[in-house]
Image: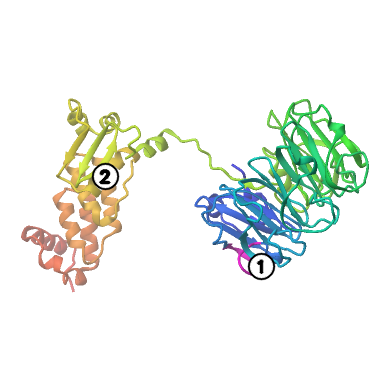
Amino acid sequence: MLDVGKWPIFALHSQEELKLIRQACVFGSAGNEALYATENDEVFGLGTNCSGCLGIGDTQSSTEPQRLGILCGKKIACLSYGSGPHVVAVTTEGEVYTWGHNAYSQLGNGTTNQSLVPCQISTNLLNKKVIEVACGSHHSMVLTSDGEVYTWGYNNSGQVGSGSTANQPIPRRVTSCLQNKIAINIACGQMCSVAVIENGEVYVWGYNGNGQLGLGNSANQPTPCRIAALQGIHVRRVACGYAHTLVLTEKGMLYAWGANSYGQLGTGNRSNQSYPAPVTVDKDRVIEIAACHSAHTSAAKTQGGQVYMWGQCRGQSVTLPHPTHFVCTDDVFACFATPAVTWRLLSVEPDDYLTVAQSIKKAFDSPDHADVRFQVDGKYIHVHKALLKIRCEHFRSVLNNNNDDIIEISEFSYPVFRAFLEYLYTDSISLPPEDAVGLLDLATFYRENHLKKLCQQTIKQGISEENAIALLSAAVKYEAKELEEFCFRFCINHLTVVTQTPGFAEMDHDLLKNFISKASRVGAFKN
């Protein structure tokens, strides 16, 4: 499980709150803004909220999470952000939502007005399922399920790939050399764009002042151009930093090019590189690369699980891949990047391993593998004969020679009998105190002494002046000595009110006689 608590912006959250987070993205000029989704697909934002980038309907900063109602229940698949900041989110249905800074039309809504709430972008994307998103400083790019690339926003250096330097207000498909190509991965630097094609070729366009396009020069490129230097090398993934580029090949090799003033290329020096240069990360196969357009930091993870980092690491220049103690590349950016942002949407998946006890609990009342059903008050409860016989002596005798698939129960109510069966699966009871008396009756009938103790503990929690006599009567009836003593003491401590209740007036004669006698012995009637 990823630890989102490593990002300072989550420092004010309690451990209980952090446990509910299933996805998170930290961004902003100082890592001072965050969006996250909970296990219930509720989406929240917190932080400084520059340009309304939290999507909460205003530009007010907040240290308390604010709900994004429009996205709640949408199930976010991927998300990226720009420097404004602007945010582009894609749902599992392939829908695109944008909000935040929009001075350069980077929201793709046809205007330059900032948006304070997420708005769906459908122009030219209708009937298209978007599966990936990448943002540069002020431009946006998405990849569809059929391998098409669409861009919009700031285009001063050709980063939109349209062939001009005019800003692009709505999504347009990137064609030119990509016209008949199927893209499988995309990434954006501050002002450049990269796409990996299914045959392993890499196409680049946009700003190239630091050689970040890998074309061997520093000239900007207004349309996609294939990196000839990677001829014969099958690339699978790409990641872009502020002005440098990393690619990962199908053989697990790593190449880098572009700006290198902090050693972010991992080549052992700080000289810019306009051609792809191989990067040696130990002798193990690399399976993941990481970079972010707002940082000069690089990271990689090997097949053996070792995570490396290089580049700008807390103000220092690390020019060669350096091994870390981290288990994922995300932690490199939380602890060493400037600013401390996320390079991708974090997926904080819960550990899906179940203990034996958890597995048994999950199997209760599940029709999937049950071999017997109890019918109570017309409702079914699905259970397993073997478990019931292991856990309960009553069922050992009842089920031994019983091959019925359905067993009817009329002695107890549905809530009571269901709570009993659930107890056999979980060792706990989930009944309100007022219903626990019925379960106490069942526990006495089936001679389940441990269950009887649990019932008494639950009943104690619901005692009041009005029901104290009724609970005392039940305790005597079911020979629940601990509960009987507890109810008696409660009645003595609240004697004036208890003796004025209808329950006291209707008290059984023998019980009343015993109550008065016992109360007298403890001095309840002394002045």
Query: Closer to the camera, 208 or 263?
Result: 208
- Which kind of residue does numbered mark 2 sit on? Arg
User: Is there any visible trace of residue 15 in the rendered image?
Assistant: no
- Which kind of residue does numbered mark 1 sit on? Ser
Query: Closer to the camera, 459 or 203?
Result: 203
Question: What residue lies at 23% left-to-right and 60% top-to-bottom?
Answer: 489
Q: Mark 2 or 1 closer to N-term?
A: 1
Q: Which circle marks residue 61 in the picture? A: 1
Give the farthest residue toward the left.
Answer: 509
Question: What residue lies at 62% left-to-right and 47% top-to-bottom?
Answer: 128
Q: Quadrant of the C terminus?
A: bottom left
Look at the numbered disc 1 and give the secondary structure of its residue.
loop
Residue 23 placed where, x, y %? 59, 49
Asked whether 57 falls inside the magenta stretch, the response is yes
> For this view, does 129 lie left or right of residue 107?
left
What is the distance, in whole Å, between disc 2 and disc 1 at their CAs? 49 Å
Q: Which circle marks residue 399 in the picture? A: none
Query: Closer to the camera, 312 or 481?
Result: 312
Asked whether 31 falls inside the magenta stretch, the response is no
Considering only vertical position in the picture, is 57 above or below 28? below
Q: Main secondary structure of the magenta part?
A: loop
Magenta segment boundaries in residue numbering: 54-66
Query: Closer to the camera, 262 or 178?
Result: 178
Give the farthest residue toward the bottom.
Answer: 527
Considering only vertical position in the picture, is 94 above or below 181? below
- What residue is shown with label 2? 418
